[in-house]
Image: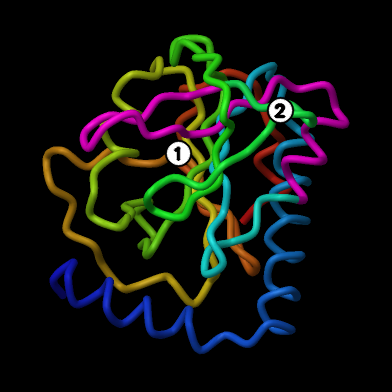
Amino acid sequence: MQKKKIRKIIGVKRKLVDSLQKLHLDILVYLNLKKFLSKLDFTTAFIYMSLPDEVDTSRIIKYLTAKGKKICVPKIVDKEKMIATEYRKDSKLKRNKFGIVEPKETIEVNPSNIDICIIPLLAFDRSLNRIGFGKGYYDRFLREVTSSCLKVGIAYYFQMVPRIFAEKHDVELDVIVTDRLILRKKENKYRGEYNEKDYT
C-alpha cells in the first residue's frame, strides 16, 4: 500500500476515535511508556508536543519532569529544519504555523546530547518502519542524533499496518510503544538498558 493511501486511511481512523476512547488509549500508552522508560538510565529526552489527533504526551512530560530529566521539544525554524529546544515547566508557549505548541524562547539543545527521542507516528509496521506526515522533519532531525540515542515512536495499536516500504531517507526506530504492545529491536545499540523479558 502506498504511503499516501496509508496516511488517508489512518488519518480517518484517528478522527473516528471519540474523546473518552482517546483518553483511555492515551492512558494505556502512557502507562506502557512509563514502565518502559523506568528501566532506562538517561538524562535528556526529546519529546514532541502533541496535536489533538496524536497520542497525548502531557502525562509523560510531567512524569519525566518529576524525575528530574532534562526535556527538549521540537521547534521548527524553517521549511526544512527542526531543532530541539529546552522545555521547562515555566516555559512560555506559542503555536507555530502547523498549530503545534512550542516554547517562545529558543534554548537550542545539541542533538548529540539527547539520550532518547520520543516521536509521533501516523502509521507503523512490526519491522519498526514509520510513516509521518510527509514533511520529513523528524527523519532529518533523527539523522543528527548519535547512534546510541534511543529512537522511540508512540502510537495507537490501530495505527499498525501490515507493511511499510521504507525509503532510503526513512530512519528506522528502535522501539514503538502502543496501548497494546511494545515492539523493539533485538540489538541494544543505545544508552541505558531494560529488562527484555518484561516486554513482548
Quickly name the residue at label 2.
40
**Residue closer to the observer: 59 or 75:** 75
Give the x, y percent position of residue 151.
47, 35
* Rendered image quadrant of residue 163: bottom left
Return the disc, 2 or 1, that comes first in the chain's sequence: 2
Residue count near mark 1 (Cα–Cα under 10 Å), binned few <14, some 14–19, many ≥20: many
**Residue closer to the observer: 140 or 164:** 140
Residue extending farthest right: 66
- Which residue lies at the image location 42% right of the left edge and 57% below the top edge? 121
- Which residue lies at the image location 34% right of the left edge and 29% below the top edge? 77
Image height of 175 relative to 126, above or below: above
Say whether residue 193 is left or right of residue 161: right
Query: Quick check: is 70 in the magenta stretch?
Result: yes
Q: Quadrant of the N terminus?
A: bottom left
Image height of 190 relative to 163, above or below: above
Query: Quick check: is 137 in the magenta stretch?
Result: no
Say whether residue 14 is left or right of residue 41: left
The local secondary structure at tag 2 comes to loop
Q: Quadrant of the C terminus?
A: bottom right
* Rendered image quadrant of residue 104: top right
Quickly name the residue at label 1.
174
- Which residue lies at the image location 51% right of the left edge and 14% below the top edge? 109
Q: What segment is highlighted magenta in the picture? A: 59-85
Amino acid on which disc 2 is placed? Leu
Amino acid on which disc 1 is placed? Asp
* Rendered image quadrant of residue 52: bottom right
**Residue closer to the observer: 14 or 168:** 14
Q: How many marks?
A: 2
Give the x, y percent position of residue 190.
51, 22
